[in-house]
Amino acid sequence: MTSIISHAIKDPVHGTMQFSTAEDNWIKPFIDSPNFQRLRHIKQLGMGDYIFPGAVHTRFNHCLGCCYVASQISQKIGLPDEERQLVIIACLLHDIGHGPFSHTFEDIFHHKLIRHEAWTPFFLADFRKPEFFEKYNKRNPKFPLTLEKFTQIEEMIMHKSTVKRVLADIVSSQLDSDRLDYLLRDSHFCGVSYGQYDFRWMLNCMTMVDSHYGPRLGITHKGIGVVEHYLMARRLMTRNIYHYQKKLALEFFLIQLLINLAESIDHHPAYSELKTTRLGKFLIQANHFNEKIKLSDNTEKFKEEFLTANYADYRELCDYDIFAIMKQLSATNDNHASAQIARRIEYRDMPKIIRLDYVDIKIAEEMLTDFKLSHTKTIQDWQIALIKNPHQSYTIEEDPILVVNETGQVKPINEMSLMINAISDKFENTAFLCIDSLIIDNPNIKNIIAKLTEKFG
């Protein structure tokens, strides 16, 4: 393959991302597609920019960065051109199934039964067409796309075990291109240093290692320090950015707005105009789906039916659809929950946070449930909620990062790092009360707060 650089993208995180002529031809048809361009209008961190004003970067930015990181790793470990082509395309498309506000939108579905990964096969199927292959192969006569190759790309994105493991590792693992990019990118745009680590040294220490599954992506013993730094960066970003309480509280409000709207839009007179919007139609169907699965054990059947029937609308949704409806709702005098929440967000009446760091969560849930049942006439369900987000910084069982030591032995990194061993498989929890600012002085609210803080403080 020629090493001539034909395309360079200026990036605030990686500097100048340089792609060779062949790489540019491999990815450009996908980048130019409407499905990929849609990611320009979906923010990476949901409502993170309400807290960190610089966090307006998008899934589009991140996917390009992930693709570049995959290219760098592939070259470092010496993948042949045909395999590198598949890997960088898979990394480019790995987030193509995201909906508005990224992961936040998944919460409109009961028990998060439909995540962005469930939509991914539908987006990929749009590329699995003769007309796209023909256009692609005219540009890539030396590296044509076939159904067999595209199936491998799909399987890498969907975490299928049939793919060569070292390729799958670059796309999805505890040391994948996705995490290596988003930690640096999210840290940069949030204006914090929590997610910074030495990417160039990490890249320098990457290598192929032997395992029971064949060659895997791993690191040399010289890279233990940078992986320690990287895993701690992931932990700090999770605690201080991804699970930042005000961010999660605002996203909870946004989801409550959409759920309440979905439940009422079909019959609320004031929302007749919203029923005909793309988002309105989708929310009506989402509400029907939620009602169905509450009464049935056959969730997979209903899930597949919903995905198939509503993909055409979902494919067109982005952040702007929600902003438009939120602005319209906030301008009304309607007292419906969705309009009230829209006004809170529009005029930045931020919810109040009561941290519950040392609370017995099960007991707190029971206390809050009893409280809500006894105050249904004065306090709406969305106005006070217990939000919890357990997380792990590193898991051994999931798929350990492998290290080649000085003697050539391959070991899980936790056996060679005291720090990583200490955080392995340890759950940390973010738990807090999210309370509507307009009821924070309500005596009943003060009473429940006092009970929780007195009992566990």
Image (cartoon, grey):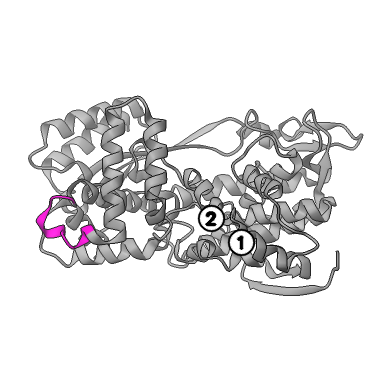
In three-dimensional space, the C-alpha distance between marks 2 and 1, rounded to whole angstroms, equals 9 Å
Report the residue at 62% width, 57% height from top: 130
- Residues 7 and 199: in front is 7
User: Mark number for residue 126?
Assistant: 2
Residue denoted by label 1 = 132
- Residues 142 and 407: in front is 142
- Residues 48 and 419: in front is 48
- With 32 as the anchor, is 335 left or right in this view? left
Disc 1 crowd, CA 10 A, few/some/many (<14, 14-19, 20+): some
- Residues 38 and 204: in front is 38
Asked if residue 68 lies in the magenta stretch, the reply is: no
Disc 2 crowd, CA 10 A, few/some/many (<14, 14-19, 20+): few
Callout 1, which amino acid? Phe
Residue lying farthest to the left in this orientation: 377
Report the residue at 39% width, 58% height from top: 47
Q: Position of residue 439 (x, y in %)?
A: 16, 49
For the N terminus, give its image quadrant: bottom right
Q: Secondary structure at mark 1?
A: helix
Q: Position of residue 339 (x, y in %)?
A: 18, 57
Q: Is residue 430 visible?
A: no
Whether residue 372 is situated above or below residue 331 in the rendered picture = above
The answer to whether the residues at label 2 and label 1 have Cβ atoms under 8 Å apart is yes
Identify the magenta region. Answer: 266-275
For the C terminus, give its image quadrant: top left
